[in-house]
Amino acid sequence: MTDHEDPGAPYGGQVIGLLLAAGGGRRLGGRPKALLEHHGRPLVEHAVQALRAGGCTRVHVVLGAGADDVRARAALDGCVLVDNPAWEQGMGSSLRAGLGSLAGTDAEAALVCLVDQPGIGAEAVARVRAAYRDGTSLVSAAYDGVRGHPVLFGAAHWADIAATATGDRGARAYLKDHAREIALVECGDVARPYDIDTPADLRHLA
């Protein structure tokens, strides 16, 4: 099921922000990652703001763990909310759901962010988005030359990515197979690519 808060609104540009926010925080005691607080707001709000401030005027948010609570507690006005009932199968299922939600839109690329990486903000999003050329683009942020998020997938790649996205590996296998096609954009000077996965990682949240 997909909620279109404003179905009549035009898509503002070909690059659509895709936020994967379905994780259940198993190693965090089962707390949905989307609702972890950072500077007084849920992580999902921070990530949506980063995508918008980085140039993605439309944002699709994939929800899973605690989806009803996220809808009730987070300010996600204007976002397209995508339910992933298979979220426990891992990030791959959320990526498939998110790409599937773009069918029938005028999107030519999806710029993918993860909700549990609050150290990645609008500056990194803007750099990756600026490297978009057309529907065949493959772009990734890099940190000291190592590929990370955000990642931009041109529409020409979506079907093959969805076919190979399994478990928690997401698009890693596809990106490995197409490494020579990826435009790497260094973001180490403007972002920190840590994940919020364990109780120790909560030190990054304020």
Image (cartoon, rainbow, N blue to C red):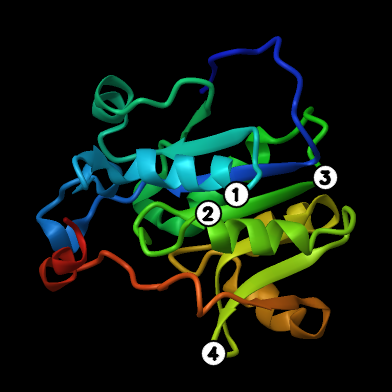
Secondary element type, mark 2: helix
Q: Which three-letter amino acid code belongs to the residue tagged 4?
A: Asp
**Residue located beneath label 2 in the image:** 122
Q: Residue at x 66, y 63 (%)?
A: 127
198 displayed left or right of 70: left
User: Mark on residue 118?
Assistant: none
Circles 1 and 2 in contact, beta carbons < 8 Å: yes
Q: Residue at x 88, y 59 (%)?
A: 133
Q: Nearer the viewer, mark 4 or mark 2?
A: 2
**Residue located beneath label 3 in the image:** 108
Residue density around tag 4, few if under 14, some if 14–19, many if 20 or more, within 10 Å? few
Counting residues from the start of the chain, the first of labels 1 and 3 encountered is 1
Counting residues from the start of the chain, the first of labels 1 and 2 encountered is 1
Give the total of numbered labels: 4
Q: Which three-letter amino acid code belongs to the residue tagged 2?
A: Ala
- The span from disc 1 to disc 4 (Cα, nearest Å) is 21 Å
Residue 198 sits above or below residue 156 on the image? below
User: Mark on residue 54?
Assistant: 1
Counting residues from the start of the chain, the first of labels 2 and 3 encountered is 3
94 displayed left or right of 66: right
